[in-house]
Amino acid sequence: MTPMKISGLLHSLADQFRQPLSAEYGRALKTSLIQQLIVTVLSVLLLDGGLASHICALALIAYWLSVPLIIVRRRADPTPGDLWFVRYGFLVTEAAVWFVGQAVWQQMGRI
Protein backbone atom coordinates (compact mmCIF):
# COMPACT_ATOMS: atom_id res chain seq x y z
CA MET A 1 0.00 0.00 0.00
CA THR A 2 1.30 3.40 -0.89
CA PRO A 3 1.46 6.25 1.61
CA MET A 4 -1.26 8.10 -0.33
CA LYS A 5 -3.68 5.17 -0.02
CA ILE A 6 -2.97 4.85 3.71
CA SER A 7 -3.49 8.59 4.16
CA GLY A 8 -6.81 8.43 2.29
CA LEU A 9 -7.96 5.48 4.38
CA LEU A 10 -7.11 7.27 7.62
CA HIS A 11 -8.98 10.39 6.49
CA SER A 12 -12.09 8.38 5.61
CA LEU A 13 -11.98 6.66 9.00
CA ALA A 14 -11.64 10.03 10.73
CA ASP A 15 -14.64 11.35 8.78
CA GLN A 16 -16.73 8.41 10.00
CA PHE A 17 -16.01 9.25 13.63
CA ARG A 18 -16.91 12.90 13.14
CA GLN A 19 -20.53 11.97 12.48
CA PRO A 20 -22.76 12.26 15.53
CA LEU A 21 -23.98 9.07 17.17
CA SER A 22 -27.68 8.46 16.62
CA ALA A 23 -29.84 8.90 19.73
CA GLU A 24 -31.65 5.68 18.79
CA TYR A 25 -28.54 3.73 19.75
CA GLY A 26 -28.71 5.18 23.25
CA ARG A 27 -32.24 3.90 23.82
CA ALA A 28 -31.37 0.49 22.40
CA LEU A 29 -28.22 0.22 24.53
CA LYS A 30 -30.15 1.18 27.66
CA THR A 31 -32.65 -1.63 27.07
CA SER A 32 -29.84 -4.06 26.38
CA LEU A 33 -27.89 -3.11 29.51
CA ILE A 34 -30.98 -3.67 31.67
CA GLN A 35 -31.44 -7.12 30.11
CA GLN A 36 -27.78 -7.96 30.61
CA LEU A 37 -27.87 -6.92 34.24
CA ILE A 38 -30.92 -9.08 34.96
CA VAL A 39 -29.57 -12.14 33.12
CA THR A 40 -26.10 -11.79 34.66
CA VAL A 41 -27.43 -11.52 38.21
CA LEU A 42 -29.74 -14.50 37.72
CA SER A 43 -26.99 -16.61 36.15
CA VAL A 44 -24.62 -15.88 39.05
CA LEU A 45 -27.29 -16.87 41.56
CA LEU A 46 -27.87 -20.30 39.98
CA LEU A 47 -26.30 -23.18 41.89
CA ASP A 48 -25.07 -25.13 38.89
CA GLY A 49 -21.34 -25.07 39.49
CA GLY A 50 -20.82 -21.89 37.50
CA LEU A 51 -22.10 -23.24 34.18
CA ALA A 52 -24.72 -20.53 33.69
CA SER A 53 -22.32 -17.77 34.67
CA HIS A 54 -19.70 -19.07 32.20
CA ILE A 55 -22.28 -19.14 29.43
CA CYS A 56 -23.44 -15.65 30.35
CA ALA A 57 -19.85 -14.38 30.31
CA LEU A 58 -19.25 -15.87 26.86
CA ALA A 59 -22.48 -14.33 25.56
CA LEU A 60 -21.50 -10.94 26.99
CA ILE A 61 -18.11 -11.12 25.29
CA ALA A 62 -19.62 -12.15 21.95
CA TYR A 63 -22.29 -9.46 22.15
CA TRP A 64 -19.91 -6.65 23.08
CA LEU A 65 -17.48 -7.66 20.33
CA SER A 66 -20.24 -7.32 17.74
CA VAL A 67 -22.09 -4.18 18.89
CA PRO A 68 -19.19 -1.74 18.37
CA LEU A 69 -18.81 -3.05 14.82
CA ILE A 70 -22.47 -2.28 14.13
CA ILE A 71 -22.25 1.18 15.69
CA VAL A 72 -19.04 2.12 13.86
CA ARG A 73 -20.45 0.90 10.57
CA ARG A 74 -23.67 2.95 10.68
CA ARG A 75 -22.99 5.58 13.30
CA ALA A 76 -25.52 8.26 12.31
CA ASP A 77 -28.20 6.30 10.45
CA PRO A 78 -28.86 2.84 11.94
CA THR A 79 -31.15 0.40 10.16
CA PRO A 80 -34.05 -1.27 11.99
CA GLY A 81 -32.03 -4.50 12.00
CA ASP A 82 -29.08 -2.73 13.66
CA LEU A 83 -31.31 -1.33 16.37
CA TRP A 84 -33.02 -4.68 16.87
CA PHE A 85 -29.68 -6.45 17.34
CA VAL A 86 -28.36 -3.79 19.70
CA ARG A 87 -31.60 -3.94 21.72
CA TYR A 88 -32.32 -7.71 21.75
CA GLY A 89 -29.17 -9.31 20.36
CA PHE A 90 -27.83 -10.21 23.79
CA LEU A 91 -30.80 -12.48 24.46
CA VAL A 92 -30.35 -14.20 21.09
CA THR A 93 -26.60 -14.51 21.69
CA GLU A 94 -27.25 -15.93 25.16
CA ALA A 95 -29.58 -18.58 23.77
CA ALA A 96 -27.16 -19.51 20.98
CA VAL A 97 -24.20 -19.75 23.37
CA TRP A 98 -26.33 -21.80 25.78
CA PHE A 99 -27.22 -24.44 23.18
CA VAL A 100 -23.83 -24.55 21.49
CA GLY A 101 -22.00 -24.47 24.83
CA GLN A 102 -24.06 -27.34 26.19
CA ALA A 103 -23.32 -29.47 23.13
CA VAL A 104 -19.59 -28.67 23.11
CA TRP A 105 -19.17 -29.20 26.85
CA GLN A 106 -21.03 -32.52 26.70
CA GLN A 107 -18.64 -33.66 23.98
CA MET A 108 -15.70 -32.59 26.15
CA GLY A 109 -17.12 -34.41 29.14
CA ARG A 110 -17.42 -31.28 31.25
CA ILE A 111 -21.11 -31.75 31.96
Image (cartoon, rainbow, N blue to C red):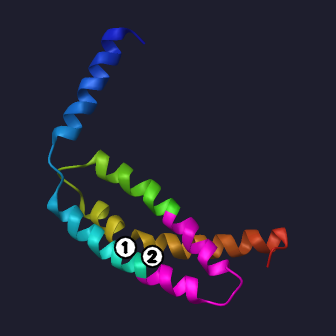
Determine the secondary structure under disc 2.
Answer: helix
Quadrant that contains the C terminus: bottom right
- Predominant SS of the magenta segment: helix
Q: Is residue 21 above or below residue 43?
A: above
Q: Is residue 12 above or below residue 88?
A: above
Q: Quadrant of residue 87?
A: bottom left
Q: Which residue is mark 1?
A: 88
The residue positioned 16% from the left and 56% from the top of the image is 22
Q: What span is in magenta?
A: 38-60
What amino acid is at disc 2? Leu
Determine the secondary structure under disc 1.
Answer: helix
Check residue 108 for magenta coloring: no
Callout 2: 10 Å neighbours few (<14), some, many (20+)? Answer: some
Q: Which residue is mark 2?
A: 91
Left or right of residue 85: residue 61: right
Disc 2 to disc 1: CB gap under 8 Å: yes
Left or right of residue 41: residue 88: left
Q: Quadrant of residue 38?
A: bottom left
What amino acid is at disc 1? Tyr
Where does the image place residue 80, in percent across and percent down from the top left? Answer: 25, 64
